Every structure is written in C-alpha cells, then in structure tokens.
C-alpha cells in the first residue's frame, strides 16, 4: 500500500480506512492533505478487493476546517483563476460507499468533507459546525447546499449565520448523522457497518449509492425512471441470481461482486 504524508491508510477485510493525520493542526485541511485524501480514496475505489470505505480523524478532531493560515492571504483573482476549492469535490466522484466516522470537531470544511461522504456516524462527543461567518467568509465546499438538504433551512441558517455548533445527539435528531456510538467504539462500529455493505454485491451497492445521490439532483419523475432502470439492470448480475436463489433455498448468499 502507498503511504501518504497527511493520511494513514489501512485495509480491514473488504473495507478501506483513511485516517486524516495532521495532529498538530487538528487535521486542518491544507491543500496537500486534501490531495492525499482524494488520492487514497481513489486508490481504494479502483481496488477490486475493497467494497466500502471509512474516513475518520482523531478523537479530538475529524477536521477543524480548511487551513485558515494557508488561506488567510489569498486574493479573489487567484481564487477565481485557479478555481480555489474546485478540487475538493473529488470525494463526491468516488463510486463505492464512504462512511464518515466523526469524533470531535467537524467544523467548516471538516463538516463539508463529512457531508461529501455517503453517511455520517458520530462519536458521542462529536461537534458539527459551519463557523466561517466568524472569519468573515461563508462555507465554500458545499456547506450551504448539503447541510440545508440534510437538516432543513431553519437549522442550516442557524448554524451558518450564527456559527453555533450541533452536538452528536442534535445532529442525529436533525438528520445530519445516521448513528451515534461511544467515541472509543466509533471506528470499530463504522468498519463493522462498512464490512456489511462490502459483503453485498458490489455492482448493486454502487447502483444503490448512485440512485440515492441522484435523488438530490433529479426531478421525482427522472429519479424514479433512473431507479427503475438500475433496478432492472441488477438482473444482469450473477449476484442477483445468487441472492434470490439463496433466499429460496434458505441459505446464505455467496456474492461474487459480478
Ligand atoms: N486552520 C489552521 N489551523 C488550525 C485550524 C484551522 N482551521 N484549526 C485549528 N488549528 C490549529 C491551531 O491554530 C492550533 O495551532 P498552534 O498550536 O500552532 O497554535 C492547533 O490547531 C490546535 O488548535 P487550538 O489550540 O485552537 O485547539 P482548541 O482545542 O483550543 O480549539 C477549535 C479547537 C475550537 C476547533 C479551534 O481550533 C478552532 O476554532 N478552529 C478553527 C475552526 C474554524 O473556524 N473552522 C472553519 C475554517 S474556514 C473553512 O473551513 C472554510 C471552508 C471553505 C471551504 C474550504 C476552503 C479551503
């Protein structure tokens, strides 16, 4: 496995784990860290022995945001001509499922990276926030868009306009977080869930992810059309035959991911 400066990678069974590792700055997302994160996820995405991924940080911080010290002297013209932040969206082109396992702070770009993943599992001490307004700026990597579709307009406005943080319980109640675990169990539980996903037919898992993500962009009619076509397409896989035969024969399926 390749090694990186700002992330650690590990594979457990069919699960690829990427741990953000910049402890001195609470995993502040400097450009080289974002490059390492994207490269590590892409490597797992194209690795046939991996079926799902977990992205995590440390117990104190998932990530405390974009690197403020790196960002503070940037100017509009170079932001625009170099399209600052455009490369952040690499995570959203990963096609296998990604669970964000969030302990501690997920602030600004950290919260945005977590929301680019497919679901968020939180440790019970996690804190989510979009505090950019306190720095004289606004969310720039999807905060105003993804947060609003996850928690609704009023809570999104509250977080983005006041900079107030949400704790794990509130974030779960609001729909930002899928499940909460004790902080020290979070990674193992996230890997366990990712292993369950990775045990299922990979083409169907990828189609399911694609269908859910498209629901956020397409009209209902277009979304239902896409879903029905993808559903029909699963019948071209050996795994659909195996899954349904196993049910009829009262045995466990043995998926081959094809
Ligand atoms: N950028 C750079 N360095 C950081 C960041 C950051 N976002 N967050 C923490 N650090 C550094 C601190 O400067 C400190 O370094 P040093 O020891 O050299 O002084 C070290 O990490 C430890 O931090 P603290 O001493 O502050 O730790 P505390 O436990 O006292 O506080 C907090 C923890 C509350 C998380 C605090 O560090 C904090 O408020 N951090 C900033 C949070 C923030 O404002 N995040 C939003 C950033 S803006 C953003 O994300 C814009 C997104 C737009 C898209 C992306 C653009 C690239």
Image (cartoon, grey):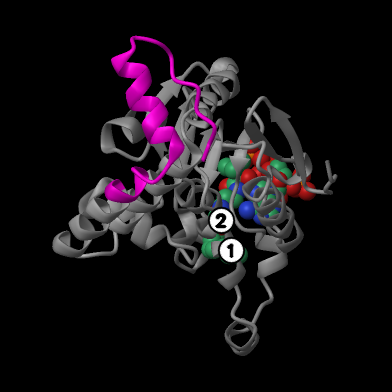
Magenta highlight range: 231-258
Give the Cα separation between the discs numbered 1 and 2. Answer: 7 Å
Name the front one of labels 1 and 2. 2
Residue at the location (54% across, 25% down)? 195
- Callout 1–callout 2 Cβ contact below 8 Å: yes
Task: Give coordinates of residue 111: x percent, y percent.
Answer: 49, 48
Q: Is residue 30 above or below residue 155?
A: below
Q: Element under label 1?
A: helix
Residue at the location (53% across, 25% down)? 190
Q: Element under label 2?
A: helix
Which quarter of the picture shows residue 59? top right
Residue nearest the observer in this picture, 179 or 38: 38
Q: Which mark is residue 23?
A: none
In this picture, residue 102 sits left or right of residue 31: left
Residue nearest the observer in this picture, 21 or 188: 188
Can see residue 183?
A: yes
Task: Give coordinates of residue 77: x percent, y percent.
Answer: 61, 90
User: For the view shown, which residue lies furthest in the left direction?
Assistant: 221
Residue that mark 2 sits on: 91
Q: Is residue 47 above or below residue 199?
A: below
| Disc 1 residue lies near ligand 1 with CB under 8 A | yes
In this picture, residue 205 sits left or right of residue 73: left
Q: Is residue 247 magenta?
A: yes
Residue at the location (46% across, 44% down)? 203
Can see residue 158?
A: no
Q: Is residue 56 magenta?
A: no
Q: Which mark is residue 88?
A: 1
Q: Quadrant of the N terminus?
A: top right
Task: Give coordinates of residue 174: x percent, y percent.
Answer: 27, 37
User: For the view shown, which residue lies furthest in the top direction?
Assistant: 250
Q: How many marks?
A: 2
């Amino acid at each position: 496995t390749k090694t990186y400066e700002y992330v650690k990678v590990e594979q457990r069974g069919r699960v690829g784990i990427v741990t953000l590792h910049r402890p001195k700055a609470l995993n502040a997302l400097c450009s080289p860290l974002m490059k390492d994160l994207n490269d590590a996820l892409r490597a797992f995405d194209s690795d046939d022995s991996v079926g799902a991924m977990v992205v995590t940080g440390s117990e104190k911080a998932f990530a405390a945001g974009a690197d403020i010290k790196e960002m503070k002297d940037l100017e509009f013209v170079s932001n625009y001509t170099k399209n600052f932040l455009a490369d952040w969206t690499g995570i959203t082109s990963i096609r296998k499922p990604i669970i964000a396992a969030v302990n501690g702070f997920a602030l600004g770009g950290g919260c945005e990276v977590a929301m680019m993943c497919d679901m968020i599992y939180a440790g019970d001490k996690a804190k989510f926030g979009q505090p950019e307004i306190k720095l004289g700026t606004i969310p720039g990597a999807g905060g105003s868009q993804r947060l609003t579709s996850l928690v609704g307009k009023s809570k999104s406005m509250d977080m983005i306009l006041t900079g107030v943080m949400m704790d794990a319980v509130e974030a779960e109640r609001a729909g930002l977080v899928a499940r909460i675990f004790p902080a020290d169990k979070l990674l193992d539980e996230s890997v366990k869930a990712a292993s369950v996903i990775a045990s299922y037919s990979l083409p169907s898992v990828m189609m399911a992810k694609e269908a859910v993500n498209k629901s956020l962009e397409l009209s209902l009619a277009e979304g239902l059309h896409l879903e029905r076509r993808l559903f029909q397409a699963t019948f071209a896989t050996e795994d659909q035959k195996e899954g349904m035969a196993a049910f009829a024969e009262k045995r466990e399926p043995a998926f081959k991911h094809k």
